[in-house]
Amino acid sequence: MADRPPRQIALEFSRDPALSRADLVVSSANSDAVALIDAWPSWPANVVVIAGPVGSGKTHLASIWREEADAGAADRRKLGPAVLDTLAERPLLIDDADAGGLDENGLFHAINAAREAGTHILLTARRFPLGWGVALPDLRSRLGAASTVEIREPDDLLLAGVITKLFADRQVEIDPQVVQFLVKRIERSLATAIDVVERLDRAALENKSRITRQLASAVLGSSDSGQGTLAI
């Protein structure tokens, strides 16, 4: 059996995603949320919720808004007096509001403070507020009055754009035909797209190859079969 060429070890590097307005991919799946961000400060309510699945672009939109609005940011689990001080001066972002451990009393007082100051709170979450399991009745009432927009599961345009962007974040050029090959074969989920891009980038490094349809097919096949090695 012929010896295979040695594989390159894929080292882990920190890759910060590009989160500017110019990097944003817009389609029918996220157009309502994009329109809302672009409409600030003319928002229909003091509290706005952007809801969508993992990897759907909520953080990207929130980052764009935070820069545009010069907003502060707070941990959902610690919404104490410092948050109220922030709201007296500028808007506030609370990311992943439904990820557990929400400071319900703190958020209730923060919403009241935003109303009094005439400013805004943007919350991102995977679910609409009714699905957060909030126990405090007054907070449920406040969240019920929030303006909520949904980012839906991606259509072909958004999925292709996101895959291309994910590779660009890794400084990897990708053939549009390979992108379309992936779009037609992976689960319609941005979380899946993130995972596939990670696996393809690693496989290309290990095999010292470009990302081709053959490599993409092998990576998708190994994922389906649960195998962890590729023979390219």
Image: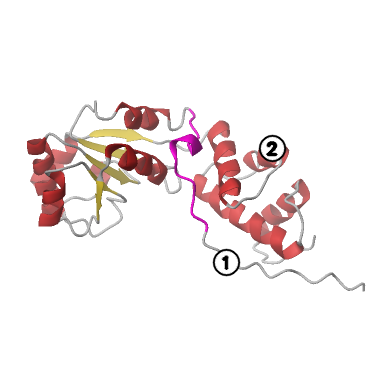
How would you classify the magenta stretch by its main secondary structure?
loop
What numbered label is drawn on residue 86? none
Q: Quadrant of residue 204?
A: bottom right
Residue 23 belongs to magenta span: yes
Q: How is the image coloured?
A: secondary structure
Give the camera-side residue of 151 and 202.
202
Could you tell me which quadrant the C terminus lies in?
bottom right
Stretch in magenta: 15-27
Residue at mark 1: 12
Q: Is residue 16 left or right of residue 40?
A: right
Q: Secondary structure at mark 1?
A: loop
Name the residue located 69 percent from the left edge and 40 percent from the top edge: 181
Q: Secondary structure at mark 2?
A: helix
State the image coordinates of residue 230 (x, y, percent, origin top left): 74, 63
On the picture, is 230 further left or further right than 57?
A: right
User: Residue at horizontal 76%, vertical 69%?
Assistant: 7
Residue 176 tag number: 2
Q: CA distance from mark 1 to mark 2?
A: 26 Å
User: From the image, which quarter does the N terminus lie in?
Assistant: bottom right
What residue sits 9% from the left and 43% below the top? 113
Mark 1: few, some, or many residues within 10 Å (few <14, many ≥20)? few
Q: Is residue 54 visible?
A: yes
The answer to whether residue 194 is above or below residue 114 is below
